[in-house]
Image: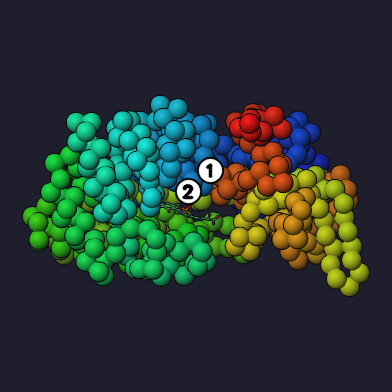
Amino acid sequence: MYVSDCISVNERGHLTIGSYDTVELAKQFGTPLYAFDENEIRRNIREFKKSIDDEYNGNGLVVYASKAFCCKEMLRLCNSEGAGVDVVSGGELYTAISVDFPAENIVFHGNNKTYEELEMAVDYNVGRIVVDNLTELRTLDKIAEEKGKTVGIMLRIKPGIDAHTHSFIKTGQIDSKFGFSLETGEALEGIKEALSMENIKLRGLHCHIGSQIFDLDPFELAATVMLDLFKQVKDETGVELEDLNLGGGFGIKYLKSDRPRAYSDYMRKVSTAVNSYAADLGLKTPFILIEPGRSIVGAAGLTLYTVGCVKDIPDVRTYISVDGGMGDNPRYALYQSAYEVICANKAGEKRDWTVTVAGKCCESGDLIQEWTRVQPVEPGDILAVLSTGAYNYSMASNYNRIPKLPVIFVKNGKAREVVKRETYEQMCSCDI
Ligand code: LLP
């Protein structure tokens, strides 16, 4: 078993994704490429939805956080599974609009949305704009008034919780650029102002405590902290808010040793806490929105590279260079993220060689993984890096003017491109 059930080894000793031979994928589409098992993505969404049905009477919505991996086909898939989508920029919103994503199921985030982005959201009647600060609230009210519309919003709250994760991706503490803080009274002030606005409909409150979290306790704590605020709002204004958005952040398996929790464990814990605490406080149970990104797509995707040179530096280390790098996966350079690396055409063999996998960028820090175990690889072999479905394609760059990779979806023995490989011409298309 690898990091996901959708990854295996076939009778030829080749690595497979969704039962599709990855060596064949490399031949068909060239390398480097990203490949996803479409069925695995669908299973993940269905499982999360089922956990809301089973544990919370279906009184909630799974809102896929498209920052993890956004392209038109992914958003079509989400819509076909009945999930909503979380967008965080005009570009992600544009992608959703271009596939006619139902406006009511779009949640629009961002700590510094531009005037144009807010207008775009209001024009499309986005169901919930998550307002980050007072400036934005007032701007939005003005836009709504000008357009003669009532805009549904939530306020982003910092619940001040340490979710024990990588400090770069912790967003729920007081020292964060995101949202209204509880401690300073800013949150309540924002809520009262929003409630007083004629063109604004405050639907509820949002929080997000971090990413790649395995521990369920911080999620439960966040839910209760938010309910305390619901209660305070009710006491001070008489208004009972309807929606509680608990963000995303569920950890996935990057390494065999990682132990992610099932969605049902999460929902059971959160539902129990919300139901009983809301009852204690005399509140009705809120409609819950959950925003998983990484856990929907992360382990459903991998990257395939071709090995170029193998450089053994005696008594130092062995570098294996591949035809991609930090342009398609900046996560090791940014966060020292761990990944499993497998030689796709020798997947049946033992991984008993310790190497550093380097990219082809003109930079020493362009590494995909250091001191990792792989099969004895040679130039021309296909190297797979697992669990790259989240925050790889979406964080890719054209550093060194290397074109972006294609994205292939495999499903039931078929492979199709859902994002084409960028050409040099396309890469230069904005140059004057
Ligand atoms: N909702 C909000 C408001 C968020 O800020 C995020 C992630 C999510 C949902 C989805 O979280 P997920 O379920 O994917 O953990 N680039 C980093 C991750 C940054 C996450 C930012 N916010 C990485 O590569 O690890």
Mark 2 residue CB less than 8 A from any atom of ligand 1: yes
Q: Residue drawn 76% across and 66% down? A: 371
Q: Secondary structure at mark 1?
A: loop
Camera-nearest residue between 264 and 89: 89
Q: Residue drawn 24% across and 61% down? A: 187
Q: Which mark is residue 69?
A: 1
When the figure is inspected, residue 333 is found, relative to residue 91, above or below; the finding is: below
Q: Is 407 left, or right, of 161 in this rendering?
A: right
Q: Quadrant of residue 64?
A: top left
Q: Residue drawn 84% across and 67% down? A: 317
**Position of the N terminus by quadrant:** bottom right
Q: Is 53 left, or right, of 254 in this rendering?
A: left
Camera-nearest residue between 396 and 411: 396
Q: Residue drawn 63% across and 31% down? A: 432
- Please report contact status of discs 2 and 1: CB closer than 8 Å, yes or no: yes
- In the image, farthest residue toward the front: 432
Residue where numbered disc 2 is placed: 293
When the figure is inspected, residue 171 is found, relative to residue 121, above or below; the finding is: below
Q: Dot 2 surroundings within 10 Å: few (below 14), some, or many (20 or more)?
A: many
For the image shown, how many numbered marks are present on the structure?
Answer: 2
Q: Amino acid at mark 1?
A: Phe
Q: Dot 1 surroundings within 10 Å: few (below 14), some, or many (20 or more)?
A: many
Camera-nearest residue between 194 and 266: 194
User: Does residue 240 appear anywhere in the picture?
Assistant: no
- In the image, farthest residue toward the right: 314
Question: In x, y percent, where is residue 282?
Answer: 12, 60
Q: Amino acid at mark 2?
A: Gly
User: Does residue 65 appear anywhere in the picture?
Assistant: yes
